[in-house]
Image: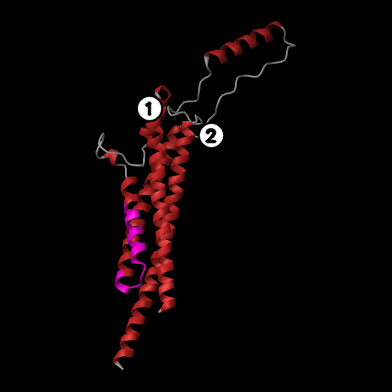
């Protein structure tokens, strides 16, 4: 009799833990998608500025000296003979969707906030899932523990430590001022500094992205391990 009550009690506890895990899994996936989307957008913003579609100084790109000479020469030819066809003006890159750097800076600040919030909540959700797995003895502790530490490393490398400890350590998140200054000076960089420039804005971002993806994959293995154990039970 006591054994039956003990089994029923354990079954109820396991069911409660599984319901809690189901809620945490849904929120964990939502925070993962939010963080992933914000990371991709921040990298896209960097390449938009880097390729020159948005001037980091917030000004419309000016026509070069050669372009000005061609326009003046064409104007003189038309003035001399109005029947001559007008030559095409030199092409220049225009801002993407007419967005200025000031507006892009606002988007960068917004997605920086969303990314930090999603990263912190993602880590906390992983921690709660780990605790529920331990208390409910659901199994897969190896996978969820690894997933938690990967998520923690993701959040640590992501945070903009350069704002708190300038010149000591960097975070993957960049501010609009950093992006503006780096892209404006990048044309004068030599090979070594150019490599460091791309490592700062692309290599570091890739490291953080991989940590996030590996954490999510580990948590997926944990879910499979739970299902496998429950089927055995």
Q: Nearer the viewer, residue 53 or 170?
A: 170
**What is the quadrant of residue 107 in the picture?**
top left
Question: Which part of the image, by quadrant, shows the C terminus?
Answer: bottom left
**Residue pictured at 31% horizontal, 94% vertical:** 1
Part of the protein shown in magenta: 134-152
In the image, farthest residue toward the top = 80
Residue 17 drawn at (x, y percent): 35, 73
Q: Nearer the viewer, mark 2 or mark 1?
A: 1
Residue 148 drawn at (x, y percent): 33, 58
Lower position in the chain sequence, tag 2 or tag 1 = 2
In the image, farthest residue toward the right = 83
Residue carrying label 2: 96
Q: Nearer the viewer, residue 194 or 187?
A: 194
- Residue 180 seen from this side: no
Q: How many marks?
A: 2
- Residue 229 seen from this side: yes
Prevailing secondary structure of the magenta residues:
helix
The relative height of residue 146 versus residue 8 in the rendered view (above or below) is above
Residue 192, disc: 1
**What is the quadrant of residue 147 in the picture?**
bottom left
Q: Nearer the viewer, residue 143 or 161?
A: 143
**Residue pictured at 38% horizontal, 77% vertical:** 15
């Amino acid at each position: 009799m006591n054994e039956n009550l003990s089994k029923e009690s354990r079954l109820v506890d396991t069911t409660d833990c599984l319901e809690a895990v189901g809620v945490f899994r849904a929120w964990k996936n939502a925070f993962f998608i939010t963080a992933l989307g914000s990371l991709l957008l921040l990298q896209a913003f960097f390449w938009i500025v880097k390729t020159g579609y948005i001037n980091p100084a917030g000004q419309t790109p000016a026509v070069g000296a050669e372009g000005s000479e061609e326009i003046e020469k064409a104007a003189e030819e038309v003035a001399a003979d109005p029947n001559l066809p007008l030559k095409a003006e030199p092409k220049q890159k225009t801002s993407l969707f007419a967005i200025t750097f000031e507006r892009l800076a606002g988007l960068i600040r917004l997605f920086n906030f969303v990314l930090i919030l999603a990263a912190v909540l993602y880590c906390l959700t992983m921690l709660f899932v780990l605790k529920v797995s331990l208390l409910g003895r659901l199994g897969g502790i190896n996978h969820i523990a690894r997933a938690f530490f990967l998520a923690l490393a993701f959040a640590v490398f992501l945070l903009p430590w350069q704002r708190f400890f300038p010149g000591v350590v960097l975070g993957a998140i960049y501010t609009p001022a950093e992006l503006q200054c780096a892209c404006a000076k990048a044309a004068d960089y030599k090979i070594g500094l150019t490599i460091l420039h791309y490592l700062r804005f692309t290599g570091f971002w890739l490291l953080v992205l991989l940590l996030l993806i590996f954490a999510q994959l580990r948590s997926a293995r944990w879910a499979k391990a739970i299902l496998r154990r429950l089927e055995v039970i």
